[in-house]
C-alpha cells in the first residue's frame, strides 16, 4: 500500500510540475507562481483520486462492465424533435410564413425579395379575388374596385343592422383593406 501511495505522489507531482511549466512558458512565470495554491489543490485531488483508483480498481472495473452490459441493449441516441403544423386553409399557411419572415428581421436569403428568409413569395391571388379584379389589373382599377367595395361594406352603413350582419361587414372591410394594402405595395 505504501508503494502505491508513493507512486501516486510521484504521478501527481509530475502532473502538477508539467502544468506549472506550461503556465510559466505560456503566460509568464509570475502567473505560474501566482497559481501555486490552485496547483496544490489539483495535486491533492489527483493524489487522492489516484490512490482511490489504484486501491479499488477491481471494483471500478466490475462497475464499468456491469454498466456496459446494462446499456448494451439500450444504445444512447440523440433525440430529435420535429414539429408538425397542420394548416386547414391556404390562408393559414400563407400567414404562418408571412409571420416567420417578419420575425426574422426581414433578412433575405437566396436572392428572395420581400425580406423572407425562406425564399417564399406571397401568393396575392386571394387579394385580387377579394377586390374582384384580374391579376393583371392596373393601379387605377385596383383603387376603383377598393373604393366601390368600401362604399358597399362600410360599417357606418350598418349601424342599425343585426349584430351578425355588422360583424360580417366589419370582417369584410378588414379583408378589403388588407387586400388593398398588399396590392398597392406592388405599385409603389
Image: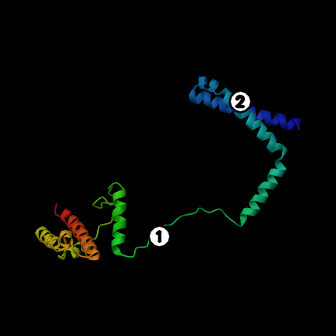
Q: Secondary structure at mark 2?
A: helix
Q: Residue at horizontal 17%, vertical 73%?
A: 149
Q: Secondary structure at mark 1?
A: loop
Q: Residue at horizontal 53%, vertical 64%?
A: 81
Q: Pick whichever of labels 2 and 1 is earlier in the sequence.
A: 2
Q: Residue at horizontal 30%, vertical 61%?
A: 112
Q: Nearer the viewer, residue 166 or 90?
A: 166
Label 2: how many Cα within 10 Å (few below 14, some 14–19, many 20+): some
Q: Is residue 117 visible?
A: no
Q: Is residue 127 left or right of residue 46?
A: left
Q: Is residue 21 left or right of residue 83?
A: right
Residue 47 in percent (x, y) is at 77, 36
- The quadrant in which the N terminus is found is top right
The quarter holding residue 96 reads: bottom left
Q: Is residue 60 visible?
A: yes
Residue 28 in percent (x, y) is at 58, 25
- The quadrant in which the C terminus is found is bottom left
Q: Residue at horizontal 81%, vertical 40%?
A: 51
Residue 117 in percent (x, y) is at 35, 60
Q: Nearer the viewer, residue 100 or 156?
A: 156
* In the rendered image, the vertical position of residue 20 relative to residue 129, given as above or below: above
Kindly identify which residue carries mark 1.
84
Q: Nearer the viewer, residue 122 or 88?
A: 88
Mark 2 or 1, closer to the camera: 1
Residue 154 in percent (x, y) is at 19, 70
Q: Is residue 105 left or right of residue 179?
A: right
Kindly identify which residue carries mark 2.
40
Amino acid at each position: 500500500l505504501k508503494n502505491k501511495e508513493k507512486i501516486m505522489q510521484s504521478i501527481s507531482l509530475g502532473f502538477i510540475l508539467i502544468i506549472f511549466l506550461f503556465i510559466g512558458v505560456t503566460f509568464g512565470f509570475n502567473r505560474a507562481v501566482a497559481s501555486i495554491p490552485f496547483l496544490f489543490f489539483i495535486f491533492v485531488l489527483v493524489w487522492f483520486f489516484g490512490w482511490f483508483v489504484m486501491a479499488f480498481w477491481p471494483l471500478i472495473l466490475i462497475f464499468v462492465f456491469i454498466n456496459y452490459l446494462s446499456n448494451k441493449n439500450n444504445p444512447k441516441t440523440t433525440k430529435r424533435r420535429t414539429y408538425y403544423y397542420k394548416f386547414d386553409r391556404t390562408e393559414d399557411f400563407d400567414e404562418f410564413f408571412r409571420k416567420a419572415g417578419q420575425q426574422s428581421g426581414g433578412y433575405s436569403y437566396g436572392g428572395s425579395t420581400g425580406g423572407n428568409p425562406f425564399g417564399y413569395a406571397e401568393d396575392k391571388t386571394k387579394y385580387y379575388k377579394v377586390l374582384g379584379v384580374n391579376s393583371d389589373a392596373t393601379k387605377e382599377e385596383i383603387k376603383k374596385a377598393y373604393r366601390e367595395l368600401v362604399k358597399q361594406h362600410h360599417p357606418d352603413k350598418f349601424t342599425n343592422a343585426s349584430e351578425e350582419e355588422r360583424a360580417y361587414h366589419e370582417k369584410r372591410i378588414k379583408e378589403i383593406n388588407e387586400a388593398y394594402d398588399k396590392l398597392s405595395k406592388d405599385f409603389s
